[in-house]
Image (cartoon, rainbow, N blue to C red):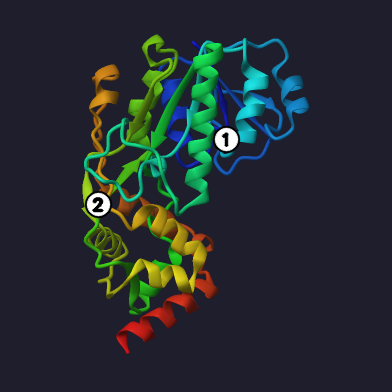
Amino acid sequence: MKVLFIGGTGIISSASTHLALGRGVELYLLNRGESARPIPDGVHVLHGDIRDPASVTAALGDHEFDAVVDWVAFTPEHIETDLGLFTGRTRQYVFISSASAYQTPPQTLPVTESTPLRNPHWPYSRNKIACEDRLVRAYREDGFPVTIVRPSHTYDRTLLPFDGGYTVVNRMRQGKPVVVHGDGTSLWTLTHHADFAKGFVPLLGHPAAIGETYHITGDEWLPWNAIYDTVAQAAGVKADLVHIPSEVIAAADPEWGAGLLGDKAHSMIFDNSKIRRIVPEFKCTIPFWQGAREIMAWYDGDPARQLVDAGLDATMDSLVARFRG
């Protein structure tokens, strides 16, 4: 099977790149020659910039593919570019959407693929919904062979699960309080990227996936208090949690708040029955306590990775002083 990944070295996609190669896929990556992660041996690299269609056309030449996956499409304009580039060139086009596109807050749990799409809080999610709408229209009207995949909060060893990243761990290690949105009891789903890949790679080239939508998430549901405590334990400290309403955080830092009100502030748990019907072997085996140890080992492996956002740290100090005071 011949597959093209647009991207393929990111947090979510890198594990799928390795698994696809391990399963004998003839894998091509389209990129600009810049990668935060090493490209594995055996990958064919096509040098082009997906935001520059002329360079992509030159890079693709006369290649055709069994599947094309765009890991870095975020707006309807990106989708229009892909429709122009890949119509007639691939038997399957996979769009990486987002579980944050689901109705927020959800009216019923667990979330299924038929849960309505609506997120009034976060432009990122609304753009993903618009991308899906355009691709569904292309499938219905022109037979464009789309499959839509909605990851939830997927991480690798480089990604701490909360806003601020290492800034939060640095506060923990200094004995300073850390801000947790709401009362910390909303349930959240974290998915290790290696587990995501187990559900994703078998969809490539699968004829029954054309025209369908799947989310691929973990089955472990954790309250945010437990997520913070698990990271603190992996960091060798005890967390001092200060609970602050998400709306108050959003007023102090609109960017932080958008990701809370549009995503993390609401309980989100998922029914993975649909992906298991087409990929019956899909099973998540990496619990977050293990993932948290991988994350902290990576950050502690090089002090240069331990970046602290001074502005966000000051915002956290201000919020803590206001609510503790």
* Residue 219 falls left or right of residue 15: left
Q: Position of residue 268 (x, y in %)?
A: 28, 47
Q: Position of residue 267 (x, y in %)?
A: 26, 52
Q: Secondary structure at mark 2?
A: helix
Which image quarter is the C terminus in?
Answer: bottom left
Q: Position of residue 1 (x, y in %)?
A: 49, 10
Does residue 169 lie above or below 81 as drawn?
below
Q: Quadrant of residue 29?
A: top right
Q: Residue at x 25, y 52 (%)?
A: 289
Q: For residue 73, which numbered disc appears in the image?
A: 1
The residue beneath circle 2 is: 289
In the foreground, 126 or 156: 126
* Residue 77 falls left or right of residue 158: right
Q: Residue at x 48, y 35 (%)?
A: 14
**Quick one: label 2, few (<14), some, or many (20+) residues within 10 Å?**
some
Mark found first going from the N terminus, 2 or 1? 1
Q: Position of residue 15 (x, y in %)?
A: 43, 33
Q: Quadrant of residue 5?
A: top right
Amino acid type at circle 1 is: Ala
Amino acid type at circle 2 is: Trp
